[in-house]
C-alpha cells in the first residue's frame, strides 16, 4: 500500500500554497504582458543616424525630417552623427542596430556607391539594411572657369579632344558621386580625363577658380553661390531633366542621351525590422515629406522633393546597386580598401 511520510505530508500544503501563489501571479501578470506585447509603436525615443559630419547637407536634411517625424510619432528623434569612411561607419551602425524600429538612418546614395566600391564591408547592404523611403534628389553640376571659351558640353568635348592629354577634373573625393559622374562622362564622350580628388567641395572649387583644374563636378547646393556670383560657369547638370535651381542649363543627356547621375537621399532601417513598423515609418516619412517646412528646406538647398516609399523604393534601390556596380567595373574605379 502506498503511504506518504509525515515530512512529505507537512510539505504538501506549503507546496500547494506556493503553486497557487505563482498561478495567481501569472493570471494577474497576463493582461500586463499582453498589453506590453501589443503596446503601440513607438513607446520611447528614436535615433536617426546621419553618416556625415554636422552642418552638411545630409545632416541638415536629417534634422529637418527628425523634427517633422517626431511630431507624428509622438516621440523625440535624436540625430546622431556617425561620420567616417565615406558614410560606411553610419551604415554599419544602422545595419548592426536592433531591428526594433528605434534606429533609422538618413543618408545619400553614398550607400550604394560604397557597396560597389568596397569588397570588404562588414555588412550586406541588400539584407542588413531596409530601404524605407526616397525623399529627395539633387543634380550634380559640371563646372568650368568663366575665362574658358566653352559654353556647353559640346564645346567641352571638342576642347578636350584638341588638348594634348585630354583634361583633368576635380571632385569632392575618390569614390564620390562626382567622381563616378566624371567617369561616366569619360566613357560616354570617349575623351581622356584624369581625376583629381579633393577633400570636399570647397577646396575643389577653390582650385577650379585658381586655374588648377580644367573642370569640376560637385553638387548643385555647393556650386550655386559661386555660379550665381559669376565666379564659376555651369555647363550642364547630370540629371536627365533640367534643374529648377539652374534655369537655362542643359542636362548632359542632351549631348549624350541616356546619361544620368544624381545624388539622392533616403531613409533606412536595420534589416529585419518588422513589416508593421516599417509601414508605420514609411507613412510618417510620407506625411512629413508633404509638409511645407520640409519642401521649403529641400528647395532652399537645391534639392528636388521626390518621394518613393516601400516596395517602390526597394526596387529603385536594388536597380541603383546594380547600376553602380556595373559602372565601377566598366570604368575600372578603385579606392583604398
Image (cartoon, rainbow, N blue to C red):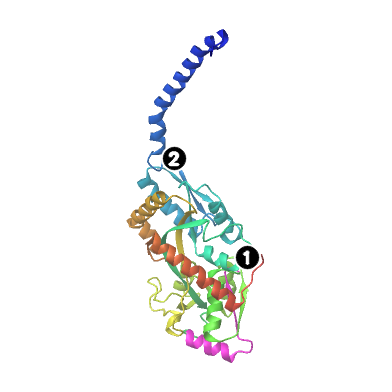
Q: Residue at x 58, y 78 (%)?
A: 330
The residue carrying mark 2 is 44
Tell me residue 195's x, y (percent): 61, 76
Query: Which residue is outermost to the front?
Result: 1
Q: Nearer the viewer, residue 306 or 294?
A: 306
Helix, strand or loop under label 2: loop
Above-or-below relation of 317 to 93 = below
In the picture of the structure, the residue carrying the numbered disc 1 is 119
Image quadrant of residue 121? bottom right
Which residue sits furthest top? 6
Q: Is residue 75 visible?
A: yes
Q: Position of residue 335 (x, y in %)?
A: 64, 69
Mark 1 residue element:
loop
Residue at the image position 33 percent from the left and 57 percent from the top: 290
Asked whether residue 164 is drawn in magenta, I would say yes
Q: Nearer the viewer, residue 238 or 270?
A: 270
Q: Which residue is farthest bottom?
A: 162
* Chain part drawn in magenta: 153-173
Amino acid at each position: 500500500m502506498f503511504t506518504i511520510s509525515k515530512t512529505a505530508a507537512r510539505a504538501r500544503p506549503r507546496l500547494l500554497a506556493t503553486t497557487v501563489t505563482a498561478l495567481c501571479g501569472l493570471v494577474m501578470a497576463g493582461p500586463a504582458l499582453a498589453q506590453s506585447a501589443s503596446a503601440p509603436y513607438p513607446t520611447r525615443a528614436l535615433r536617426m543616424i546621419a553618416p556625415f559630419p554636422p552642418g552638411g547637407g545630409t545632416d541638415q536634411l536629417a534634422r529637418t525630417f527628425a523634427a517633422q517625424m517626431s511630431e507624428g510619432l509622438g516621440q523625440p528623434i535624436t540625430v546622431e552623427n556617425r561620420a567616417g569612411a565615406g558614410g560606411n561607419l553610419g551604415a554599419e551602425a544602422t545595419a548592426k542596430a536592433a531591428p526594433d524600429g528605434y534606429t533609422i538612418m538618413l543618408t545619400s546614395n553614398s550607400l550604394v556607391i560604397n557597396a560597389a566600391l568596397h569588397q570588404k564591408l562588414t555588412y550586406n547592404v541588400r539584407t542588413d539594411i531596409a530601404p524605407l523611403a526616397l525623399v529627395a534628389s539633387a543634380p550634380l553640376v559640371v563646372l568650368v572657369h568663366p575665362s574658358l571659351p566653352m559654353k556647353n558640353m559640346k564645346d567641352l568635348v571638342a576642347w578636350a579632344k584638341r588638348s594634348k592629354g585630354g583634361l583633368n577634373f576635380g571632385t569632392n573625393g575618390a569614390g564620390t558621386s562626382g567622381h563616378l559622374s566624371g567617369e561616366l562622362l569619360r566613357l560616354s564622350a570617349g575623351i581622356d580625363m584624369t581625376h583629381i580628388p579633393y577633400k570636399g567641395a570647397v577646396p575643389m572649387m577653390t582650385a577650379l577658380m585658381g586655374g588648377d583644374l580644367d573642370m569640376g563636378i560637385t553638387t548643385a547646393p555647393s556650386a550655386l553661390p559661386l555660379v550665381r556670383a559669376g565666379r564659376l560657369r555651369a555647363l550642364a547638370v547630370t540629371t536627365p531633366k533640367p534643374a529648377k535651381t539652374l534655369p537655362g542649363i542643359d542636362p548632359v543627356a542632351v549631348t549624350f542621351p541616356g546619361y544620368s547621375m544624381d545624388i539622392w537621399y533616403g531613409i533606412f532601417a536595420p534589416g529585419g525590422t518588422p513589416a508593421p513598423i516599417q509601414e508605420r515609418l514609411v507613412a510618417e516619412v510620407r506625411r512629413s515629406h508633404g509638409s511645407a517646412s520640409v519642401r521649403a528646406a529641400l528647395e532652399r538647398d537645391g534639392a528636388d522633393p521626390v518621394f518613393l516609399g516601400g516596395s517602390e523604393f526597394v526596387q529603385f534601390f536594388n536597380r541603383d546597386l546594380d547600376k553602380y556596380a556595373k559602372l565601377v567595373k566598366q570604368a575600372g574605379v578603385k579606392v583604398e580598401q
